[in-house]
Image (spheres, rainbow, N blue to C red):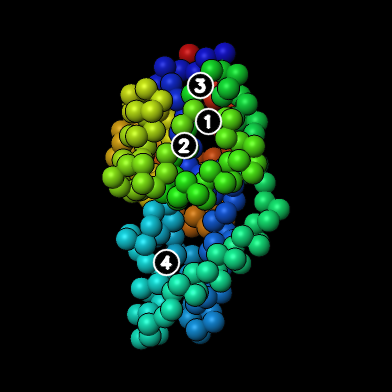
Amino acid sequence: MTLPVKFQSVIFDFDGILVDTEWAIYQAWKRTFEAHSQHLPLDVYTRCIGSDFATWSPKTHLEELTGRAFDWHDLDTRRQHEIEAELTHEGPMHGAIELLEFLQTAQVPTAVASSSSHRWVDAWLDRLDLAKNFHAVVCRGDAPRIKPAPDLFLEAARQLDVTPEHCLVIEDSMNGLKAAKAAGMHAWVIPNRVTECLDFSAADQTFRSLAECIGAFAVQSQKA
């Protein structure tokens, strides 16, 4: 089985696409805000999803709301421990393994392109035995800029030796969607609990899960 020519490779985001990490991260930030009598709505917090705090910073936002400066080293350490504890038993997102196996059978090269660090992404891929499913893993530091800039996706395409217009990106965030489009790639979006409030009308298609993507690939393969 082969996919249509326009999809010669598939590039996955990591957080919120392969593993449901986004909700735990948001909840930890929400608790930080609540500890200082402040609210952190999802539609505000999502500005930094898929990127970093240069796009929008919850740290700066909390300091502006409270008029205080905080010891972020201490707060970051505690928040990271909370996140890791909450995610102790987290597995791959629904349909992830099945989709990766489908693409492997179809001989479609795959990559991860994430604004997160290699330390975070590689540890998860190894822990869940998913590293073997990817031909390339591109993270923060592997390209000049992270999302919403296109650099990470373009670097992934370079490593896969596929032109951008023949790459399909699977994302969950607005910053990721913007990056994929800026790279000249097709983009499918799977909103999750954190990003479902966003308008993803610019995506080529939206799905409820990676499992749904398998059916879409199968249909397109039949038409190819």
- Disc 1 marks a residue whose amino acid type is Phe
**Are the residues flagged by discs 1 and 2 in contact, CB closer than 8 Å?**
yes
* Residue ID for mark 2: 137
Going from N to C along the chain, the mark reached first, 4 or 1, is 4
Q: CA distance from mark 4 to mark 1?
A: 33 Å
Taking the image as drawn, is residue 207 in sight? yes
Badge nearest the viewer, 3 or 4:
3
- Above or below, 85 against 169 in this view is below
Closer to the camera in the image, 146 or 132:
132
Going from N to C along the chain, the mark reached first, 2 or 4, is 4
- Disc 4 marks a residue whose amino acid type is Val
Q: Residue at x 64, y 37 (%)?
A: 129
Q: Position of residue 165 (x, y in %)?
A: 33, 26
**Are the residues flagged by discs 2 and 3 in contact, CB closer than 8 Å?**
no
Q: CA distance from mark 2 to mark 4?
A: 29 Å
- In the shown orientation, is residue 174 left or right of residue 126? left
Q: Which mark is residue 44?
A: 4
* Residue ID for mark 3: 108
